[in-house]
Amino acid sequence: MSLENLQHNINHVAIIMDGNGRWAKMRSHPRVWGHVRGTSVVSDIVQEADDLKIKSLTMYAFSSENWSRPQTEVRVLFNLLYKFLRKERERILKNNIRFRIMGDVTNLPVQTQTLISQLEQETFYNTGLNLTFAFGYGGRAEIAFAINKFIAENPGKKITDEDLSSNLMIPELGDVDLLIRTGGDHRVSNFMLWQIAYAEMFFTDTKWPDFTVTEFRYIIEQISKRERRFGAISATDNLASNIIIARENQKIIRVQDV
Ligand code: FPP
């Protein structure tokens, strides 16, 4: 499939990159090898999302629950983030990508925190792909954050849906259109709970280190074909009130009769 042929209507893709540990174990390697291999997949998918002109790509790199993993694994994940940022900085700048971290990075090594804030500042005015890594992130904590922020700024006022959306960690990312989870499990694991309210979900058995650009494009293509109704109905299903909806016991029943 050539790049030009893939038309899509997806603005915001969120990805839960799961299956690294199992991928490595199946190959008799320590779990962290899966994270190492998974990091190069992150590079490929970022490039592809950019090529496909997706507006925002949000990747779950480290959840607030991941703190309970063995120290070595946590350290490897920190190192991989650091190395990724060093390696990809040039490409991120060249491609006009806006880079941000969403979550709590205060426990990261100082040099990683510095690198993150440098890159966030350097890409602040970039208008291309919004690339966000959720790191030290939890969806419930983000909702609590938004509510507390609103209450602090608007004491005594009731919070609305819109208020909550506009007080999230990175409000301009907006709702997620498509949530992809690799690794075979069908759950959302505290990821962007507010923003996925109307997201299409795609679960694949592929473990993250085996995930390819081709599968990513396939998913985008499949999801673009789905009709998203946001709780409404299809326009073609809108019935006039005199339309016959059934015939029962030789009686005609119209919309207006029910
Ligand atoms: C889940 O796999 C994956 C993670 C906890 C981390 C994801 C991190 C990467 C892909 C690499 C580093 C990221 C960046 C942004 C450079 P798991 O270990 O839970 O897999 P399992 O379910 O098979 O145990």
Image: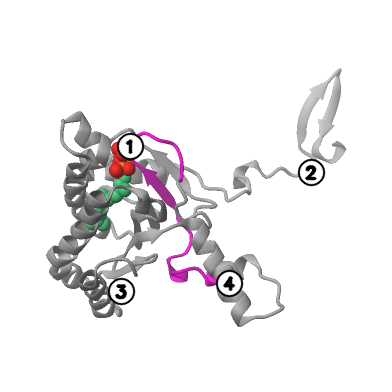
Secondary structure of residue under mark 3: loop
Q: Earlier in the sequence, mark 1 or mark 4?
A: 4
First-in-chain label (1 vs 2): 1
The circle on residue 212 is none
Pick whichever, 249 or 216, lies toward us. Answer: 216
Query: Label 1 amino acid?
Result: Gly
User: From mark 2 to mark 4, how far is it between C-alphas?
Assistant: 47 Å
Would you say residue 98 sits in the magenta stretch?
no
Q: For marks 4 and 3, give the one nearer the viewer.
A: 4
Give the mark, 4 or 3, whose residue is nearer the N terminus: 3
Instruction: Mark 1 vs mark 3: give the one in front.
Output: 1
Task: Name the secondary structure under disc 1.
Answer: loop
Which percent across, then down, holds residue 23?
23, 35
Q: Secondary structure at mark 4?
A: helix
x and y percent of residue 92 in the render? 20, 68
Q: Amino acid at mark 4?
A: Asn
Badge 3 crowding class, 10 Å Cα cut-off, few under 14, some 14 to 19, many 20 or more, is few
Query: What residue does disc 2 label?
Result: 241
Magenta span: 165-188
Answer left or right for 153 relative to 68. right
Label at residue 148: 4
Q: Which mark is residue 127?
A: 3
Label located before the other in sequence (1 or 3): 3
Ligand 1 lies under 8 Å from the Cβ of mark 2? no
Label 3 is placed on what type of residue? Answer: Thr
Image-based side of 134 in relation to 153, left or right: left
The residue positioned 33% from the left and 33% from the top of the image is: 205
Tell me how far mark 1 sits from mark 3, CA to CA: 32 Å
Magenta segment's dominant SS is: loop
The local secondary structure at tag 2 comes to: loop
How far separated are the C-alphas under marks 1 and 4?
34 Å
- N-terminal of the pair, mark 2 or mark 4, is 4
